[in-house]
Amino acid sequence: MELAIQEYAKRLKLSWIRQHYHDVQAASNEEYLLRLLELEVQQREERRVNLLLSQAALPKIPSIPFKWDEIEYNQGLTKDYLLQSQFIKNQENLIFYGGVGTGKTFLSTLIGLNAIQKYGNQVRFYTVAGLVNRLLDANEKGTLSRFFKQLEKLDLLILDELGYIPLHKQGAELLFQVISMCYERKSLIITTNLRFGEWNHVFGDPILTEAVIDRLIHHSHLVVFKGPSNRMKESLLQS
Ligand SMILES: Nc1ncnc2c1ncn2[C@@H]1O[C@H](COP(=O)(O)OP(=O)(O)O)[C@@H](O)[C@H]1O
Ligand SMILES: [Mg+2]
């Protein structure tokens, strides 16, 4: 009987039940079955979350709580809206603007982590430089369309540190393709130390820059990272 149970559980891919059905105690047949199914489902969910976490490549999160009073956002945005994946459900983007060390990477990681653990979203974190290198590499190897298919499965793409290094023409164009692909279909978080008027330095071409900004600011929320003393908001829209 033991062998048959093992075999059926294997065929049905009930791996938790296969290994642990001996350990479950219950007062009735019904309760026993319920417990088994519950624990199998629970274990599958844990496995899925772990897989999503490893695919997301999130940076390590600081062990301190995030200070929400150091950021500013527009009406219609709340802490819960960000942490409860509401912006992802509505396919909206977030632009995180602020100086170095003001918490942009921290908050984007925290949001990504919540999206995975509480909502089972598919998330991927890249620095802009890291993604552009990956795109250039895939382009060279002829695997770009495969890479795009991978990106298409995501619910949330986090692009950290736009603006730290200028992009070459091809890199800028490939990044634009990714942003266009996400347009109205997925959510992006982009962190940057540059105001929109300066994005031309990154993309190197005013028409491309305008197209990028145009795609991004539709359905976007701006979050300004003031830091303990910085005041960044006033400067964002200046050129
Ligand atoms: N709002 C905040 N609340 C708590 N800690 C913060 C906050 N902003 C920054 N920090 C601290 O500063 C560190 C650097 O933040 P980080 O997210 O890397 O900044 P940025 O990406 O904007 O350069 C964090 O690891 C954290 O320790
Ligand atoms: Mg950062």
Image (spheres, grey):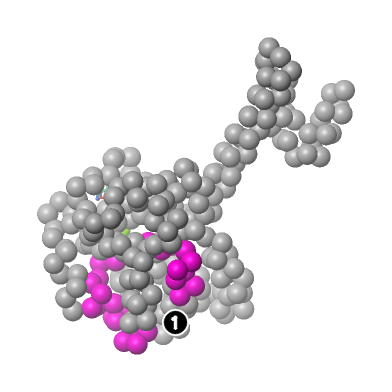
Assign the C terminus to one quadrant of the image: bottom left
Magenta stretch holds residue 186: yes
Please indicate, yes or no, whether residue 161 appears anywhere in the rendered image. Answer: no
Q: In the picture shown, does residue 191 fall above or below 14?
A: below
Q: In the picture shown, does residue 12 fall above or below 166?
A: above
- In the image, is 153 to the left or to the right of 127? right
- In the image, is 209 to the left or to the right of 180? left
Task: Name the image quarter holding residue 95.
Answer: bottom left
Q: Nearer the viewer, residue 60 or 90?
A: 90
Residue 160: x, y in percent? 36, 63
Residue 17: x, y in percent? 72, 29
Q: Crowding near pointer 1: few (<14 within 10 Å), some, many (20+)?
A: some
Residue 139: x, y in percent? 56, 78
Bounds of the magenta span? 180-208
Three-letter residue code for mark 1? Glu
Q: Nearer the viewer, residue 222 or 55?
A: 222
Q: Nearer the viewer, residue 208 or 162?
A: 208
Residue 57: x, y in percent? 48, 54
- Write the residue at 71% across / 24% down: 33
- Write the residue at 75% across / 30% down: 18
Assign the N terminus to one quadrant of the image: top right
Outermost top residue: 27
Task: Name the image quarter holding residue 36.
Answer: top right
- Write the residue at 52% across / 54% down: 122
Magenta stretch holds residue 197: yes
Q: In the picture shown, does residue 33 fall above or below 86?
A: above
- Write the residue at 49% across / 58% down: 155
What secondary structure is found at the residue carrying circle 1? helix
Q: Report which residue position mark 1 lands on.
A: 173
Q: Is mark 1 within 8 Å of ligand 2?
A: no
Total numbered labels placed on residues in the image: 1
Please indicate, yes or no, whether residue 84 appears anywhere in the rendered image. Answer: yes
